Image (cartoon, helix red, strand yellow):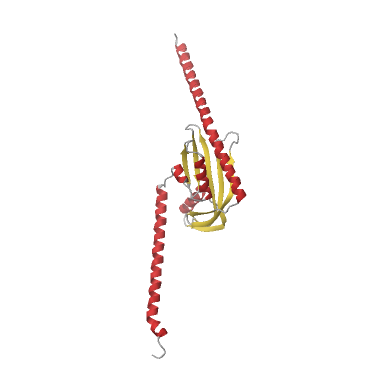
Amino acid sequence: MGVLDDLKKEAQALAAKKAREASEQGAALERAREHLEPRMQALLKYFTELKTHLELVNREILASYEIRGVGRVDALVQGDYRVATERPDRIQRFGFRCVCAKDAAFQVNQSDVAAVSAYRDYLRDNGLQAKVRDTGRGSALFMVQAAVPVLVEFSADYERVAIRLRVRNLTSLGVTRHTLTLDEVDERFMDELARAILRVENRFDERVGASISPSSKKRLKKQIQAAMRRKEIDEQLKERKTERESTITHRFGRGLFRRKDD
């Protein structure tokens, strides 16, 4: 047997192996579709109905967010609900969107080129809009709009036979990602996520096994410390006010309330 015959047989064996692998992958993909697509359809149906009912009921839902450079922004009205999918015939990805907003804007000054660039990145990463005015020497004034976009996005992971969930700005600014098994994405899961969207008591974080990131823990610690300092200052001011009132009463009380016959 010559060299050419050997190479021919090797090529035929490789081609047969690739064909088997392609067939196996195709069968695995088909099995994944059989399980994934009905669950994705159920999710799309649920959140499409949620959007419709929210628009019909028109319930006032208020949200608040901590925005860097601005502070806590309260009384943002949630609305403008939308559901969008790439391919209605084969649901591989879809998103539920809304916006929490009010008619207001906030001034944020950034004093140098690095700070301006970092703040632009922060706004872009969180989907926030702002008008920017150059104030000279690398500084800028941002007029940050009081509008926070919210996204809940589902996508089918055919390789893992799982559903990926991406949540943006739901309870705070930022993105969280979760990979869920089909068993985890049940009716209870959908209800808890819907309750989180409605901003009522819910156990959604428990359902997805969410944990607080180190940066979030650090930010939360700072917020708690700031709140404790404000409380301490308020108590000190209250004590000083009481002391002043007591001193005034002590000094002038006798003259004010002395009997006329004294």
**Which residue appears farthest toward the right when viewing the image?**
56
Q: Using the image, determine if residue 38 lies above or below residue 63.
A: above
- Quarter holding the C terminus is bottom left
Question: What residue appears at the point 47 percent right and 42 percent down from the top-left corner?
Answer: 177
Residues 87 and 117: in front is 87
| Side (left or right) of 38 relative to 5 | right
Q: How many marks?
A: 0
Residues 20 and 202: in front is 202
Q: Indicate the position of residue 219 as horizontal and vertical percent values.
A: 42, 52
| Side (left or right) of 231 relative to 126 | left
**Which residue appears farthest toward the top when viewing the image?**
1
Q: Using the image, determine if residue 142 lies above or below residue 168.
A: below
Q: Using the image, determine if residue 63 lies above or below residue 260.
A: above
Q: Indicate the position of residue 95 as horizontal and vertical percent values.
A: 55, 42
Q: Using the image, determine if residue 23 lies above or below residue 183.
A: above
Residue 229 seen from this side: yes
- Quarter holding the N terminus is top left
Residue 136 seen from this side: no
Question: What residue appears at the point 56 percent right and 41 percent down from the top-left corner?
Answer: 46
Q: Indicate the position of residue 101 as horizontal and vertical percent values.
A: 56, 54
Residues 132 and 35: in front is 35
Q: Indicate the position of residue 230 as horizontal and vertical percent values.
A: 41, 62
